[in-house]
């Protein structure tokens, strides 16, 4: 029974479809695992045992009735707490939403339910998805299953840690500047950021609307592709959703898994030559690149001169959009309300609620964003950052005329110890040095484990042109076939 938790999602779904295990057994095994290890890992903010078992029973009944099951039916999935789940607490890692039970499901969650997956719970995250370590969660940090004294990445550290700790074989994340890929990298799991608009933002609590992208997290590349296919595709309730079918990501991953990359051109970004990155990370990345060339890929160096301005541009655009999006948390409509004693004015209640409900990083972003958008400074900050965004997009477009995908390490450093980057915000922001350009451009990118540095996982990033998500899955699966999956020390 316990080995059900070690199976890939594809294998677990196969076992359920063939009747070798029931969906209820699979769900129970994962709930037991959560009960066993989550006291140490703290990946979950909420475990929905009753909801999960009811969903699993529906799958078992459907199978008994001879109904055709989807490719992930009966498979447990952990959902980042930034996506609304009807009647199930949704906090986005913030005190300001404590106690809120949304009256509706996000599109991603609707699609997960329709596919017969079993939502086991909501995972921890940095407050409103701002951060790279989960240390900014109002509910305490998640610990990395590889070393409980280290961060699991962020903002979606709970989703990544749940995978690495075998609490769920699949998870959902959201990536605004790296929050799927960076936690994937530092926990030795796979995280894919789809093309912006390829997955629906309906019911995703907004951080930076022009960047936010929900996506799949898994322990294998094929599993991530299977999940991507279930959650992706057009949604008329999201105005920036792309009205096209999901690229053939599962077929591409299966093709890549055969280990043949002949004819594939990999672009090595010269601006990411390793400056600011740990030597152990660059060494693992270099070895992985060599493996890919042995599979037939060709490596071409490409220059993306504006990538070095991506981080400052992002830290104007994302806070600007966040300052607008977070204005809705006013103590009237959702969750927390402070100081409503019948004497105070509405403004006072709003101000007391926001003072008590938001943590320091969120406040910092709101202040920066409000400043960057204020009249007199708008052109110098927000306007300038938008111009940089255009130049970065042009760098990508020019690069993709010469190569099929771009490659880099996912993060400059491996999982760091708690507290080591919280005193200086810039040190935390550096975690996303290599992931942010893709978000500004809008293309897809994936992180796949490529080895260890000092016993900790290193992620390999593959960036593809918009709507060529299939391409990155092919390369990622080929790399996985050469490296294998990484297993954390016993937990
Ligand atoms: N770490 C980045 C930030 O703090 C990215 C977060 C994300 O992708 N949600 O903004």
Image: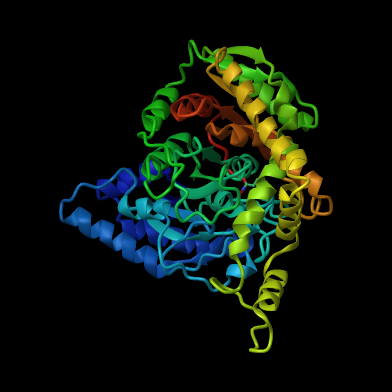
Q: Is residue 387 left or right of residue 248?
A: right
Question: Disc count in the image?
Answer: 0
Q: Nearer the viewer, residue 346 or 83?
A: 346
Residue drawn at x 43%, y 35% as measured from the top left: 222
Q: Nearer the viewer, residue 55 or 7?
A: 55
| Residue 3 visible from this viewpoint | yes
Query: Where's residue 416, x and y in %?
Result: 75, 46
Residue drawn at x 70%, y 72% as measured from the top left: 351
Q: Quadrant of the C terminus?
A: bottom right
Residue drawn at x 54%, y 31% as measured from the top left: 443
Residue 28 sits in quarter: bottom left
Query: Where's residue 50, x and y in %?
Result: 39, 70
Q: Nearer the viewer, residue 234 or 368?
A: 368
Q: Residue furthest left?
A: 65
User: Is residue 216 depicted above or below 469 in this figure?
Assistant: below
Q: Residue furthest bottom?
A: 342
Q: Quadrant of the N terminus?
A: bottom left
């Amino acid at each position: 029974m316990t080995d059900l938790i070690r199976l890939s999602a594809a294998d677990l779904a196969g076992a359920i479809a063939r009747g070798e295990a029931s969906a209820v057994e699979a769900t129970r095994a994962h709930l037991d695992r959560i009960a066993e290890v989550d006291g140490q890992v703290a990946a979950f903010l909420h475990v929905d045992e009753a909801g999960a078992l009811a969903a699993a029973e529906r799958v078992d009944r459907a199978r008994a009735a001879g109904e055709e099951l989807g490719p992930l039916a009966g498979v447990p999935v952990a959902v980042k707490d930034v996506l609304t789940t009807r009647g199930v607490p949704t906090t986005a890692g913030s005190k300001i939403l404590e106690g809120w039970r949304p009256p509706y499901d996000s599109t991603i969650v609707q699609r997960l339910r329709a596919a017969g997956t079993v939502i086991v719970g909501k995972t921890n995250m940095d407050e409103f998805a701002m951060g790279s370590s989960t240390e900014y969660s109002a509910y305490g940090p998640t610990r990395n299953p590889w070393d409980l004294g280290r961060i699991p990445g962020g903002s979606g550290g709970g989703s990544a840690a749940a995978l690495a700790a075998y609490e769920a074989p699949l998870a959902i994340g959201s990536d605004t500047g790296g929050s799927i890929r960076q936690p994937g990298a530092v926990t030795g799991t796979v995280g894919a950021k789809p093309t912006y608009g390829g997955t629906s933002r309906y019911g995703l609590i907004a951080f930076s609307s022009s960047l936010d992208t929900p996506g799949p997290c898994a322990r294998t590349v094929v599993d991530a592709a299977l999940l991507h296919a279930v959650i992706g595709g057009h949604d008329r309730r999201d105005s920036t959703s792309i009205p096209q079918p999901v690229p053939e990501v599962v077929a591409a991953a299966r093709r890549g898994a055969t280990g043949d990359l002949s004819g594939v051109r990999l672009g090595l970004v010269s601006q990411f030559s390793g400056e600011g990155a740990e030597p152990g990370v660059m060494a693992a990345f270099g070895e992985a690149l060599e493996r890919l060339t042995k599979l037939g890929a060709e490596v071409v160096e490409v220059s993306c001169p504006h990538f070095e301005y991506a981080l400052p541009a992002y830290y104007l655009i994302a806070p600007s959009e966040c300052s607008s999006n977070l204005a809705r948390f006013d103590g009237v409509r959702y969750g927390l309300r402070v100081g409503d004693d019948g004497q105070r004015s509405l403004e006072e209640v709003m101000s007391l609620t926001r003072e008590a409900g938001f943590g320091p990083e969120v406040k910092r972003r709101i202040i920066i964003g409000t400043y960057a958008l204020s009249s007199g400074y708008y052109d110098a900050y927000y306007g300038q950052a938008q111009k940089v965004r255009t130049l970065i997009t042009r760098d990508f477009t020019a690069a993709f005329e010469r190569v099929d995908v771009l490659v880099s390490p996912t993060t400059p450093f491996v999982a760091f110890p708690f507290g080591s980057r919280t005193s200086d915000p810039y040190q935390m922001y550096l975690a996303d040095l290599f992931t942010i350009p893709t978000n500004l451009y809008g293309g897809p990118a994936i992180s796949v484990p490529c080895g260890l540095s000092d016993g900790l996982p290193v992620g390999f990033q593959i960036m593809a042109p918009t709507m060529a998500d299939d391409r990155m899955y092919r390369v990622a699966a080929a790399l996985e076939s050469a490296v294998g999956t990484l297993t954390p020390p016993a937990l």
